[in-house]
Image (tube, coloured by chain):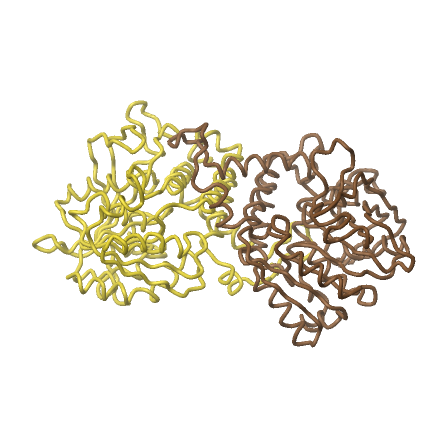
Chain colours: A brown, B yellow
Amino acid sequence: MSGSVGIVTTQFAEFDVELRLESGRLLGPLTLAYETYGELNADRSNVILVAHAWTGDAHAAGKNTPDDRKPGWWDDMIGPGKVLDTDRYFVLCSNVIGSCKGSTGPTSTNPRTGKPYNLTFPVLMVRDMVRAQKLLLDRLGIDSLLTVIGGSMGAMQALEWSILYPEMVRSIIPIAGTGRTSPMAIALNALARQAIFNDPLWKKGNYKPEHPPADGLALGRAVGHISFLSDVSMQLKFGRRFSARHGQFDFFGQFEIERYLDYNGASFVDRFDTNAFLYLAKALDLYDVAWNFESLEEALDQLRCPSLWFAFTSDWLYTPSQTEEVVTVLRKLGKPVAYHLIESDYGHDSFLVEPEKFTPKVVEFLQRLD
Amino acid sequence: MSGSVGIVTTQFAEFDVELRLESGRLLGPLTLAYETYGELNADRSNVILVAHAWTGDAHAAGKNTPDDRKPGWWDDMIGPGKVLDTDRYFVLCSNVIGSCKGSTGPTSTNPRTGKPYNLTFPVLMVRDMVRAQKLLLDRLGIDSLLTVIGGSMGAMQALEWSILYPEMVRSIIPIAGTGRTSPMAIALNALARQAIFNDPLWKKGNYKPEHPPADGLALGRAVGHISFLSDVSMQLKFGRRFSARHGQFDFFGQFEIERYLDYNGASFVDRFDTNAFLYLAKALDLYDVAWNFESLEEALDQLRCPSLWFAFTSDWLYTPSQTEEVVTVLRKLGKPVAYHLIESDYGHDSFLVEPEKFTPKVVEFLQRLD
């Protein structure tokens, strides 16, 4: 790892369009929040698009103010001399539509009513998020992407990019991804949803922003949190330690793992909107790369670029076998594909926790593309 | 499989005792609900104790009335000519204390106040449940158990029996068990707990029985349900099928797996008490066979009988490695131990769904004990 990209400012692009969604509904006008790192070269050929996960945002690297406690969510990866080297590449990250981090989502004002969309916001698919990102690239005059890289929901976006816009995409790097969300992942999201629906403060999505359904959202987040970890990582980090402040025989006494989930759930409420959380969960559930194609084969046959895939041994949410299902079809179709199963104990979160385990392969892959 | 044990009546034994619990608190008087199948032989040497799981009860086989829709929870296993052959064995199953199926638990009346215990009920450990069962065996004049068999929390009880009363226990058959509950299992129980705590109808345990915190309990049960299944079993049973009654782009539209969880959660509310669910979850979390011993080795060294262990490949709640941890120590201590890892796609629930995969080994094991 090397330097930081320093202080960056999140930018906002406005689009006076009506985007036709997979559902058939129209959404617009649109705002997209985005950040860029590094310089666009003369022939605009050095662009790397970073796609974020469920609760991520456009702020992938650097700090927005000198006082920020933490840098962007993938600062380990992006900067001068880093894996996504901003001395060479122009790195772009935009917040997906449906989120609450500056892009149009359920908290945005519906121009037809002058009120927040809340549940009148349309159900989205990941494909819709990618179509919105395409508007941003058009606006910036970019018609070629050296790669699209991302983990989890970011991996889904990378794959969709290569299917929808094969003429623009020179490679993709999907990490901890899946070709279609499994019933296990859907079941876990269903728990998170129900936790929120059960909270009387949710009011069918019409809560006041200052009175969110905090208990429901915190519990929903805790469900997600567990699915991002693994049996082994919890064993290493918490074991069976009991909270020092509680007695083992107190009814409300907590193990350390419980306190951790509580703490993280509660702090999440301060940084994420409940309806956005629900809309993105729905988009994850609906994810199926074969959607509107005859088959998985037909969908993947759209892809024309090399792809580099990573899965993690302890990821029980988007299991290695799910990545392998896609990789196997790509190989059968004769597409250039590389796949690495990475030994890691950190579950689905491995792509954030142990990037050093896969980044050498990324660097090598990018150099061969140049 | 062969015949049924027919119509059985649940019996109740009252004990005018004060049981000293692991917490140091006293609990009494006690009631234990139990059922028996088959005949006790002359020298009282043909007793098999069946131990139930979290939400199980004393009604393991047969029907309580001719109109019952379903037989007891392990009817596949217990009856004339079946694995636990009631023509040969006297099979006994009792409801654990802390439950709500006839034995003393949080819904029972506290004799000191004349009101239900609710949260004044003491936090229990599995060891306490076994001590209470011992009272019942004493009452019935039984001082030798041919085997103690059970899955999940039943496996914990079997192991505790062999540690606490080695002079009484001639063998144990723990199925899908663990020597100590993992932080992953604790984390999942924490979600279930929080789902209930978040329900305003819970009222810190002081809900009226006719107005239970149904939404919270249903969600808590759904958490458990997911952890009893597996990725593969959900794939086989539900795949990504969307509910035929809902549109894919309806915000409240459900996948089949979601409807299933909803349905099961809601029906659970009619058959189980919320506080009992919480107390038993706590007992599961606190489970550690080494509790009050210096080490796992010292605990397991108490055991003097042969043990037969089963784990299931797709069980991600009490993983095979957890069973193997115990088996490895038992072998190191020179105890006679047999262990079988059973290939099954049905997760933790495999012991209920596919008993035929392990029962031949049980029959063989029991014949050698005779």
In-image side of A77 versus B289 (left or right): right
Residue A251 quadrant = top left
Q: Is residue B342 above or below residue A194?
A: below
Q: Residue at x 11, y 56 (%)?
A: B41
Residue sticking out furthest to the top: B113
Q: Quadrant of the N terminus of chain B?
A: bottom left
- Where residue A235 appears, as percent x and y from the top left, is 47, 46
In the image, residue A173 above or below residue B194: below
Residue B139, position in %: x, y? Answer: 15, 41
**Residue A323's x, y, as percent?**
61, 64
Q: Is residue A121 visible?
A: yes
The C terminus of chain B: image quadrant:
bottom left
Front one among B311 and B269: B311
Identity of the residue drawn at 69% across and 35% down: A207
Q: Nearer the viewer, residue B307 or B255?
A: B307
Q: Nearer the viewer, residue B196 or A219?
A: A219
Quadrant location of residue B38?
bottom left
x, y percent for residue A5? 78, 43
Q: How many marks?
A: 0
Q: Is residue B36 left or right of residue B190?
A: left
Q: Nearer the viewer, residue A245 or A278?
A: A245
- The reply to whether residue B65 is visible in this rendering is no
